[in-house]
Amino acid sequence: GDGITNDRVALQAAIDGSVGQILLITGQSRIDSTGLTLRSNTHIRFAQGASIKMLAHNTDWYQMLRIWDVSDVKIESPYLDGSKSLNAATSGEWGMGISIAGSSNVTITSPTTIDCWGDGIYIANSYVADGVTSKSVTINNHLADGCRRQGVTITSGDTITFNNPIWQNIAGTAPQAGLDIEPNDNSAVFRAIRIVNPKTLDCGGPGIQVDLGSLAGPVAKTVDIHISNHIDNSQNDGPFSVGGLEPSGYIVTGSITSTNPVWKENWYLGDWIPSGPTISVVNPTIG
């Protein structure tokens, strides 16, 4: 990439032609808002200094890297720039750096996602196959900086692990959280969600938000979310916000735990039914 030319077609051809091999991306690549679609058995490595940046665009919906309905994907050191200042759109919140939907066995190491119109990373159920959730996704050392809506959103997932993420300077459109765990509907799954050593810094909204308002429904749900060693410096909407469950006659159980957090402010509990998941904040340091 030369930092000027639209490399999207060439990059997509390289992705399609390197299945089962390692694709090395070098230089300063630019792409349009169509984004790039990854295949099963994809392994991409970004060379030192390599990046992909959005060209000027006018859309509130895109995915720079789309990992949809595939398996066995590895990405090393991706640097993705959503170029929010080059977006002529004036509304919306759905421009994602990396979008993972209905995929399994995904490992992403040291991703950087900056200035996305929406979220740095978005994890969801499949958009084409009912009931297929993203499973066995591990993301290490994620840095999200300057995204408008979230550093990360998880709307559904089974065995999702973030190790040592930094989500910072998130601001522009609500909820402006470092991490938002929020289902779209009753089909969502939150099983073995592990957030290890996260830092949420200077976010416009909560450092970490868990809003389960849309999870309750005909299918009973059990959630398992564990956050450990969370550091947050928020003095706006607080470090940790949990809520959304109102009496409905539906069953949602399980546990949501934050262990050994270090926060500037106290956490917040919103609407919650007594029969809902147990919420535990263990050994907090506040102030």
Image (cartoon, rainbow, N blue to C red):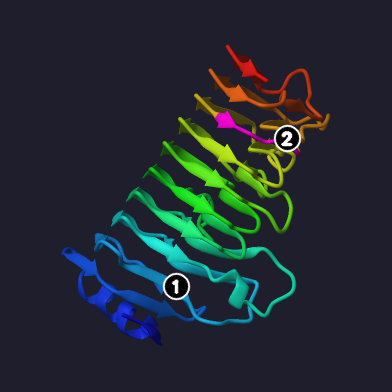
Nearer to the camera, 9 or 37 = 9
Q: Which residues are magenta?
A: 231-236
Q: Position of residue 23 (x, y in %)?
A: 21, 67
Q: Position of residue 223 (x, y in %)?
A: 58, 29
- Which secondary structure, mark 2? loop
Is residue 2 shown in magenta? no
Q: CA distance from mark 1 to mark 2?
A: 32 Å
For label 2, the residue is: 235
Amino acid type assigned to the residue bearing label 2 in the image:
Gln
Residue at (20%, 71%) from the top-left corner?
Answer: 18
**Which of the marked residues, 1 or 2, is nearer the chain's N terminus?**
1
Q: Nearer the viewer, mark 1 or mark 2?
A: 2
- Which secondary structure, mark 1? strand
Q: Position of residue 256 (x, y in %)?
A: 60, 24
For label 1, the residue is: 53
Residue at (44%, 73%) from the top-left corner?
Answer: 53
- Relative vertical location of residue 18 with respect to residue 230 in this rendering, above or below: below
Q: Residue furthest bottom?
A: 5
Residue at (36%, 77%) from the top-left corner?
Answer: 29
- Relative vertical location of residue 47 with respect to residue 235 in this rendering, above or below: below
